[in-house]
Amino acid sequence: MIYLDYSATTPVDEEVIETYAKVCRDFIGNPNSMHKLGVEAKKLIDASTEQIAKILGVKPSEIIYTSGSSESNNLAIKGVCSKYPNRGHHIITTELEHSSVIAPIQYLQKNGYEVDFVSLDENGLVDLENLQSLMREDTVLVSIASVNSEVGVKQNLGEISKIVHSNPKTIFHSDVTQSIGKERIDLSVVDLASISCQKFYGMKGIGCLIKKEGLVIEPLIHGGKSTTVFRSGTPATPLIASFAKALRLVYEDFDQKEKQVQEIHDYLVEKLNTLPVQLNSNSHCLPQMVNVSFSSIKPETMQHALEEYDIYVSTQTACSTGDYSRAVYAVTRDKDRASHSIRISLSFKTTKKEIDTFVEVFGKLLNELKIRGD
C-alpha cells in the first residue's frame, strides 16, 4: 500500500495505541468520581493536559477537549457569537476554510449575521489591505485557518492578528488543524485555535479548542461535569492520555522530520513536472501537501483508478461537499482546474520509492483515462 492521504487522517502510532490500551485497562474510574479510581484518572488527565499545554505553548486552563476540529470550529464560532451578540453581527473569513468553518458561519448568516470573505492574492495569501478595509466596529469574529487543507497555503497569522486586534472587541479564531505536527506555530497570536489529534498520528475522536484565558464563550454542550465549564461530558481519559502521547512523539526529532518532508516534496514536484499536470500548490504552501490538476479526467475516476494499484490520495478534503474544490478555485480562479484536481499529502514516513511508484502509475493512468474519455 502507498498512502498519500496523510492530511485527511494519519495512521495511529503504535506507541499511541499502547498508551490508549493501557489507560483503558488501568484507569477505569470516571475522573469526576470522588473515589480512588476517579482521583487516579483525574491525575492522569491533569498530567496529560500539562504536557499538551507545554508543547503547544499555552496554559492548561486554556485547553477545552472536544471530539475533534469540526466540533472545535463550531464551538469557537457559535460560542463567540452566542456570547457576544452586543459586539456586532459581522464576521470575516476566507474561501479557503474547511467546511466545518463555512457551515456554522452560513448558519449564523441565515440568522442575521453579515459575512465578508477577504480577498486572496495570486498565491492564495490573505490580502492584508483588504482585510483592514473589511474590519468594522461591529466585527465580532474573524476566522482564518493557519493552513488550507487542500492546497496547503500557509497564512501569516501574526500579521493577520495585528489587523484583527486593532479592534479590541474582535475575536480571532484559527483552524490550525493542518499545522499541528507539521510546523511550529505560535498560538499566542490567536484567541481561539482548533486542533484534531487524528492529523498527527493520534486517535480519532479527540481534539481540542485552545481558548485564550479571560475569553468567555457559550458552550455547545451543556450538562455534566467535565475538565472545563465550556464543554460538558465525562472526560475521555484514554483519548486524552493518547493525545498527549501523540503530540509528544510527533514533535520529537522535529527538525529532521521537517527536512525529510521537504526533500520528499521537492522530489515529488520534480517528478510531477514531467507529467501533463498543473501544480496548484506553490512556495507559500506547506510541503506536506501537493495539489495538482489535470484536464478531461474526473478526480474521482483518477482516485479510484489509483486505488486499484493500492495507492491512496484525496480529491477534496474528506469533509468537503460540492463538485469542485473551493480552495483550488480560490487560488487559481479556474473552474476547470478546480473540477479536476487531487491532493497528494506527504509525511516524514513517505519514501522516494513510494513516490517513484506513484508517479509511474499516475502518469500511466493520465494517458489511459484520457484516451478512454474518463
Image (cartoon, rainbow, N blue to C red):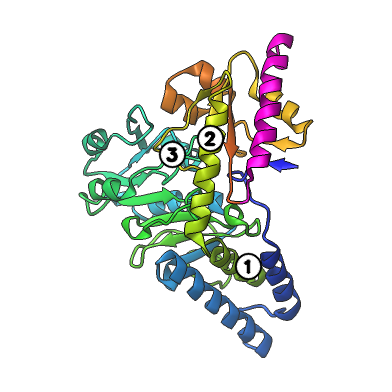
The residue that disc 3 covers is 285
Q: CA distance from mark 2 to mark 3?
A: 8 Å
Quadrant in the picture for residue 117: top left
Give x and y (percent) for residue 210.
Answer: 44, 61
**Mark 3 vs 1, N-terminal side:** 1
Does residue 173 lie above or below 322 as drawn? below
| Mark 2 Cα-neighbour bin, 10 Å: few <14, some 14–19, many ≥20 | many
The residue that disc 2 covers is 290
Looking at the picture, which amino acid does disc 1 mark?
Ser
Which of 52/211 is in front?
52
Q: Residue at x 66, y 70 (%)?
A: 238
Residue extending farthest bottom? 36
Looking at the picture, which amino acid does disc 3 mark?
Cys
Q: CA distance from mark 3 to mark 1?
A: 29 Å
Q: Residue at x 60, y 68 (%)?
A: 245
From which residue to which does the magenta span run? 349-374
The quadrant in which the N terminus is found is: top right
Give x and y (percent) for residue 69.
Answer: 54, 52
Which of 228/374 is in front?
374
Query: What label does residue 242 carry, if any?
Result: 1
Labels 1 & 2 near each other (Cβ < 8 A): no
Give x and y (percent) for residue 157.
Answer: 33, 48
The quadrant in which the C terminus is found is: top right
- Say which element carries label 3: loop
Q: CA distance from mark 1 to mark 2?
A: 29 Å
